[in-house]
Image (cartoon, rainbow, N blue to C red):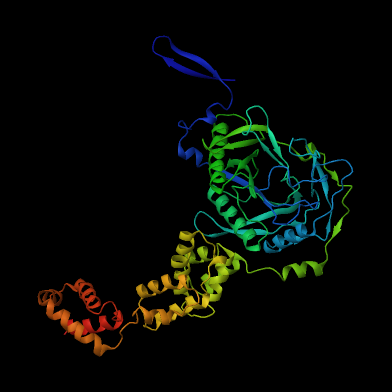
């Protein structure tokens, strides 16, 4: 115990005893920011991704999410005596696909192990996983650091394993309820090296992982449903130190924001403890989203606690170079490749590239648009503004968007050729989404939206406007050049919005600047 002294005006100072890290759970008012700045944050993340296979990792049970409790089970997933596991080939294919995307080394000989621990939602009393022979080693993920620069986060390994069931503690006032539908669902665990130095980097890392598994279509990436889960290993050390401090694992975070907040809280908690001369306990902690704090769950297990030993019911599985090449040939364009293409080759802003590569099918839709137009910035704007707004407002994804990419390219061509204005094109888009097979030019003609580009038709309108506002003309000639916009508005009004703005502007300037 440590003693803190409370000042009472009647009796002076008297001691009160507190537990060693009592103050670590409170806001660190007594520690100045420059003290925090002495320390460096060290984070490694373990990301579990549920694979989108139809059946479970080692049985034919359905792996579909959302069934009635305990309906997707069999003797194998229930851990009944005599039931033997059989490897799901698709699980290995998805793991290899992810490993190739993350530039990992793929292991040819894969062995499996039993990880022994008791929990109510793990019927067998052990988990079939990979211990010393992960299917993927090394590799990396490129993220943006806090300054917007590229940073490589190296990976330790990716291994395949099975999920446990689900315990529900809030459904019944007296008992914990167990749903074993999830027991045996295939997972890959992506283990990073401790290369992450800020909570923002952790957020960016998770964003990239989710983007990649979604592009590969091996995981839906929904953290709220538990199909993508993250545990964070967190420690602190003085800047310049070369050895790591004791790490604490934080679990039960179901959003990327929660991961970020948990890391920020845990960093301050650990620094507070160190500054008070207390010892960091290597343990597993729980994150409370309501308070933004962590609390102790149990002491941290080590490998020997799990009593790993080879899985006797699954023989080693050998993966050939031919199989790896076959899987690689199915790989879609990856987000980082598309990002480099859009920013370096097409010269789009990084912001555009981030938005365009966030969703695989939106990226593919954009790719098809730019096959039919050279105005890639206009194509980007249509994707990010008009198309995404329509999808969001109507609760659709791009796969259900019936307008063809070639139609969007045709609308861009109408604007670029001066046939319609940008605002007119938006009116055309409203009609196109109602009738996706319609021709943009035909709609423009039907709605009388074709721009007037003939200067002989626009010049009389300009003369009419200038004659209507002689005082404003004098003000313009005396230096109020901002009035050009007012004159343009009047010309557009007089033309019913059909005058080509570029032609009208040229005529206005010619007449006003004499």
Q: Nearer the viewer, residue 52 or 237?
A: 52
469 w.r.t. 98: above or below: below
Image location (x, y in percent) of residue 144: 54, 58
Residue 490 visible in the picture:
yes
Quarter residue 92 falls in: bottom right
- Residue 326 shown left or right of residue 448 in the figure: right
Residue 191 visible in the picture:
no
**Residue pushed farthest top?**
11
Image location (x, y in percent) of residue 96: 74, 61
Image location (x, y in percent) of residue 298: 68, 32
- Residue 56 shown left or right of residue 458 in the figure: right
Quadrant assignment for the N terminus: top right
Q: Nearer the viewer, residue 28 or 429?
A: 429
Q: Residue at x 69, y 63 (%)?
A: 103
- Residue 479 shown left or right of residue 27 in the figure: left
Quarter residue 338 falls in: bottom right
Q: Nearer the viewer, residue 3 or 214?
A: 214
Q: Nearer the viewer, residue 391 or 502?
A: 391
Quadrant assignment for the C terminus: bottom left
């Amino acid at each position: 115990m440590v003693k803190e002294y409370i000042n009472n005006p009647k009796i002076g100072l008297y001691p009160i005893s507190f537990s060693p890290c009592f103050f670590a759970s409170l806001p660190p008012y007594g520690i100045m920011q420059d003290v925090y700045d002495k320390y460096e944050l060290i984070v490694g993340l373990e990301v579990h991704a549920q694979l989108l296979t139809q059946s479970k990792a080692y049985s034919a049970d359905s792996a579909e999410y959302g069934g009635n409790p305990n309906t997707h089970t069999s003797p194998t997933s229930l851990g009944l005596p005599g039931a033997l596991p059989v490897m799901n080939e698709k699980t290995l294919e998805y793991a290899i696909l992810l490993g190739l995307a993350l530039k990992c080394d793929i292991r040819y000989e894969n062995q499996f192990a039993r990880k022994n621990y008791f929990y109510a939602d793990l019927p067998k009393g052990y988990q079939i996983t990979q211990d010393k022979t992960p299917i993927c080693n090394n590799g990396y993920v490129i993220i943006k650091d806090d300054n917007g620069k590229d940073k490589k986060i190296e990976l330790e390994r990716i291994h395949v394993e099975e999920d446990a069931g689900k315990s529900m503690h809030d459904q019944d006032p007296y008992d914990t309820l167990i749903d074993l539908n999830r027991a045996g669902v295939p997972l890959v665990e992506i283990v990073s090296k401790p290369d992450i130095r800020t909570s923002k980097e952790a957020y960016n890392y998770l964003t990239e992982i989710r983007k990649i598994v979604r592009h590969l279509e091996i995981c839906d990436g929904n953290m709220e449903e538990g199909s993508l889960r993250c545990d964070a290993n967190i420690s602190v050390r003085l800047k310049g130190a070369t050895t790591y401090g004791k790490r604490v694992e934080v679990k039960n975070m179901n959003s990327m924001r929660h991961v970020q907040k948990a890391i920020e809280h845990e960093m301050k908690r650990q620094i507070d403890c160190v500054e008070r001369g207390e010892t960091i306990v290597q343990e597993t902690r729980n994150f409370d989203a309501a308070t933004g704090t962590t609390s102790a769950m149990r002491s941290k297990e080590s490998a020997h606690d799990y009593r790993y030993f080879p899985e006797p019911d699954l023989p080693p599985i050998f993966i050939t170079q031919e199989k790896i090449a076959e899987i690689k040939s199915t790989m879609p364009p990856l987000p980082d490749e598309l990002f480099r293409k859009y920013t370096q080759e097409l010269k789009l802003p990084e912001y555009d590239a981030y938005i365009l590569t966030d969703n695989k099918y939106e990226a593919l839709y954009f790719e098809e648009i730019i096959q039919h137009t050279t105005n890639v910035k206009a194509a980007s704007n249509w994707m990010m503004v008009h198309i995404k707004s329509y999808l969001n407002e109507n609760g659709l994804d791009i796969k259900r968007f019936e307008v063809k990419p070639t139609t969007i390219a045709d609308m861009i061509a109408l604007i670029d050729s001066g046939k319609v204005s940008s605002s007119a094109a938006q009116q055309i888009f409203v009609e196109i989404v109602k009738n996706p097979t319609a021709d943009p030019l035909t709609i423009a003609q039907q709605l009388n939206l074709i721009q007037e580009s003939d200067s002989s038709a626009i010049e009389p309108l300009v003369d009419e406007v200038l004659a209507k506002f002689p005082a404003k003309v004098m003000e313009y000639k005396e230096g109020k050049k901002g009035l050009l916009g007012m004159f343009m508005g009047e010309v557009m009004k007089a033309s019913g919005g059909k005058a080509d703005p570029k032609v009208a502007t040229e005529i206005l300037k010619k007449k006003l600047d004499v």
